[in-house]
Amino acid sequence: MLSRIDLRGSALPGPRELAQLLPRAGTDIDSVLSVVRPICEDVRLRGAEAVREITARLDGVDVPHLAVPQAALDEALATVDPAVRAALVEAIARVRKVHADQRRTDVTTDVVPGGMVTERWVPVRRVGLYVPGGLAPLLSSVVMNVVPAQLAGVESIAVASPPQRDNGGLPDPGVLAACALLGVTEVYAVGGAQAIAVFGYGAGPCQPVDMVTGPGNVYTTAAKRLLRGLIGIDSEAGPTEVAVLADDTADAGHVAADLISQAEHDPLAGAVLVTTSEQLADDVVDLLPGLVAATKHTERITTALGGSQSGIVLVEDLETGLAVVDAYAAEHLEIQTRDAREVAMRVRNAGAVFVGPWAPVSLGDYCAGSNHVLPTGGCARHSSGLSVQSFLRGIHLIEYDEQALADVAGHIDALAGAEDLPAHAAAVRARQRR
């Protein structure tokens, strides 16, 4: 079910070359831009009318009104399973606790006497948060998107999620209940590329937003790429992925269960075990068929684990294993080794790191307090997961008095001359002609 790559006994290539050797789901966003572009353009030109027609054509649902009525939000919260409601309340509390500590404060630096620079952190005014509803309605993503936006101080928050035929053309009831719990009253029954276009251009009652966040399929991601610049985006999310770095102390049952749990998301999901123990690899492979057969989404999981995006990588030692997982830069990385925390602290590239046997990825998906909107496809080499900071912009305030400007005028003159921009220097000299 899982292919193997044996890197023992050979010199590792450089990080880029190594990354190309490792299993990874391929997502060709460019290939669907030709499909997404006319959808977005139609929404731009015809607004809500276009959204209704596109939704009927692609989703098979007629949605005469984009906005979800407040009564539907109230009903979803009133009728949600009490256990689900309690779980949402707990998840919200934990995510708020972690994310509250992320909020930066304004800082003023006295550069010289009479000259100072203040860095203000200002929230985006209005955001659109996308919540997928395809193979799995991700009500937990409502929490992960809304809480950091609220803590950042975003004043206007809209949520879009695909309409469900089984729910009368409304988004999933759990998604609506989560919105209601968080006090989000502006919710739209629209999914896919057309949802991103609604946020970007505005349509019907939805006014344009400044930023869009949240995961989605390749069409959603392509729309985010297409509209980037008009709107800010969090990332171009690809298929979800997990890597597990393990030695001979790891429990094969834990490892197998965690690989399966991530493969459950999508047939394109990636699940990679990097281990120093051939015995562990054999044990995991032996366990997988029975465990997969016992799950609800057997076909989906089998496809993911059997695809080129999943596999086992055998390494000589943990040092090599760390090099491999850094080259892979997983969205989720589990460390199941001796001295797991010490090993985890040496990881450079990962969206989130789960330390030891009692911190599976599922914990982070729901109730760890961390955020599960994370960089995929190796983007953890340069990007972070969603946080309060994602919704804040740093703005510098520069304040100099007359003497402080005069003291640095000569340096400005020299640098402006070196760049052949004499008007820059002249703008300073104009203030000295008194």
Image (cartoon, rainbow, N blue to C red):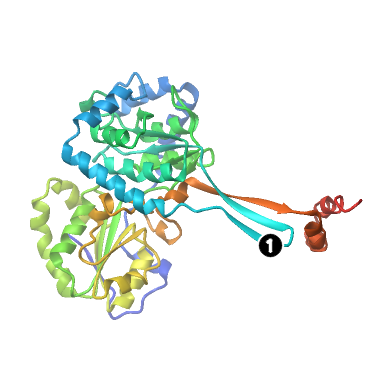
Task: Say what amino acid the circle numbered 1 marks.
Answer: Val
Crowd band around label 1 with a 10 angstrom C-alpha radius: few (<14), some (14–19), many (20+): few
Q: Is residue 170 visible?
A: no
The picture places residue 18, in percent across and down from the top left corner, at: 37, 68
Image quarter hosting the N terminus: bottom left
261 left or right of 57? Answer: left
- In the depicted structure, whether residue 264 falls above or below residue 3: above
Residue 320 occupies quadrant: bottom left
For the point 28% across and 81% down, the residue is 9
The picture places residue 74, in percent across and down from the top left corner, at: 27, 27
- In the depicted structure, whether residue 255 falls above or below residue 125: below
The picture places residue 261, in percent across and down from the top left corner, at: 20, 53
Q: Residue furthest front?
A: 113
Q: 231 or 366: nearer the eye?
A: 366
Q: Which residue is mark 1?
A: 111
182 left or right of 251? Answer: right
Q: Is residue 157 visible?
A: yes
Q: Residue furthest bottom?
A: 9
